[in-house]
Image: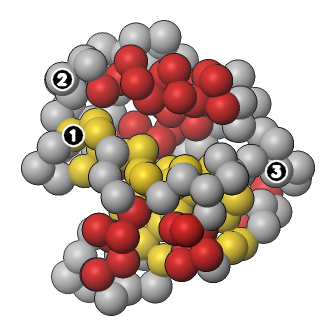
Amino acid sequence: MAEKLIHLYNLNNRFYLSTLWGVKYRFGAKFESVAAEHPLGRYVDCSGYMRWLVLHGSNGELLLPDGSVNQHSEILKQGFPIRDYKAALVNRTGAVYICFLRPTSRLAGHVWLLRNGTTMESHWGKGINSRGGKVLSYLGRQVYCYRLS
């Protein structure tokens, strides 16, 4: 799979606009339609948001399945190159990475995009927003990271 799948203008535009919608995080919540330009819904979880954001950021070229575990499997199946998360955190070239935390017996999984050390995600307590990627590195869990562009 070629790494140039994500179109940065589309990705940044969709992310910025989606931060204005006031959508909150709720575990298991999905947008009504992944194909909609402005999906309906007051709540979305991390995988539901990634499914929508990646679809629109790739001009419809990459439709991920629902659920972060299924999305991770699809990224592996598509052959995207794995990258070191710590190296991705300090990369300031504009490359886009999709990152995963696998679920444990006590903790849910998580999926987010990382670009220039900042996330694009829907997460507990906030909903759709961004934060410094190092916030997620304290969890002490293995982060799986793949380059999309």
Q: Residue at x 55, y 75 (%)?
A: 85
Q: Residue furthest left?
A: 125
- The residue where tag 2 is placed is 22
Residue 34 x, y percent position in the rendering: 48, 24
Q: Which mark is residue 66?
A: none
Specify the amino acid type for callout 1: Gly
Q: Which mark is residue 127?
A: 1
Q: Is residue 132 visible?
A: yes
Q: Is residue 81 left or right of residue 124?
A: right
Q: Nearer the viewer, residue 110 or 85?
A: 85
- The residue where tag 3 is placed is 3
Q: Residue at x 30, y 27 (%)?
A: 19
Sequence-wise first label, 1 or 3: 3
Q: Residue at x 26, y 19 (%)?
A: 20
Tell whether label 3 touches label 2 (CB within 8 Å). no
Cα distance, mark 2 to mark 3? 31 Å
Q: Secondary structure at mark 1?
A: strand
Q: Is residue 33 left or right of residue 31?
A: right
Q: Residue furthest bottom?
A: 140
Q: Residue furthest right?
A: 2
**Which class describes the residues within 10 Å of circle 2: few (<14), some (14-19), or many (20+)?**
some
Asked which colour scheme the image uses, the reply is: secondary structure
Specify the amino acid type for callout 3: Glu
Cα distance, mark 1 to mark 3? 28 Å
Q: Nearer the viewer, residue 3 or 94?
A: 94
